[in-house]
Amino acid sequence: MAKKPIITQFFITIFLLHTLKPIQSQPFSRKLSRNSFGLQKEKLTHLHFYFHDIVTGHHPTAVKVAAPGTNASRSFFGLVMMMDDPLTLTPEPGSKIVGRAQGIYASADLKELGFLMVLNYCFTEGKYNGSTLSILGRNAALMPMREMPVVGGSGLFRFARGYAQAKTHSIDFKTGNAVVEYDVFVLHY
Ligand SMILES: *[C@@H]1O[C@H](CO)[C@@H](O)[C@H](O)[C@H]1NC(C)=O
Ligand SMILES: *[C@@H]1O[C@H](CO)[C@@H](O)[C@H](O)[C@H]1NC(C)=O
């Protein structure tokens, strides 16, 4: 390739200098009024759906990513699973999908079955399409009812807080596949 004449390089340099935006100095923090941000009144929303944890079969939606080095613990302590589990309107696996539960569940209790749940509900239905809720909590999976905090959200669920209640709808002990009913109560704007 031919070397550009020095005069061309000069004009390219001048052009680039002109297109660079001056660095604007912004304060590190500032106070905003809630109203200017559209945060007038909090709403309380109830979401109801079924969570399908499919660990075996041709298309598992939860896979083991780490396992303890021994089988000594009856609670599978140390087991780490990554999930992208469908959330549906009714318990039937083929029913309408309203979102997915994406994240990790890990056995974090030495004695009984108690999972650390770290996940996002990624909704795909109606006005909530694209919005998420973040869950961080303990799931003692054999208890009839478990409760996990909603620690935040995005999209329509910005500033969200609340809790999710889980009840096992059905579990196949042969395959390990489970359907869990969720009621989620969430405050957001
Ligand atoms: C634990 O048990 C599973 C299933 O029986 C087996 O596949 C695995 O090798 C065992 N792991 C250890 C470390 O013994
Ligand atoms: C949800 O949003 C995605 C991306 O914007 C879009 O492709 C999809 O069709 C939407 N789904 C529904 C059910 O509206």
Image: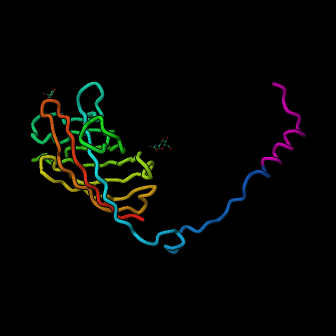
Q: Observer-nearest residue: 119 or 145?
A: 145
The reply to whether residue 65 is in sight is no
Q: Observer-nearest residue: 17 or 44?
A: 44
Colouring rule applied to residues: rainbow
**Which percent across, then down, holds residue 111?**
9, 47
Displayed quadrant of residue 58: top left
Write the residue at 31% across / 59% down.
46
| The image quadrant in which ligand 1 is located | top left
Numbered range of the magenta stretch = 1-16
The answer to whether residue 167 is left or right of residue 4 is: left
* Magenta-colored stretch includes residue 11: yes
Q: Observer-nearest residue: 170 or 23?
A: 170
Write the residue at 90% across / 40% down.
7
**Which percent across, then down, holds residue 12?**
82, 42
* Magenta-colored stretch includes residue 4: yes
The answer to whether residue 152 is left or right of residue 56 is: right
The answer to whether residue 37 is left or right of residue 11 is: left
Write the residue at 41% across / 58% down.
157
In the rendered image of this protein, does residue 1 appear above or below residue 120? Answer: above
Write the residue at 51% across / 73% down.
35
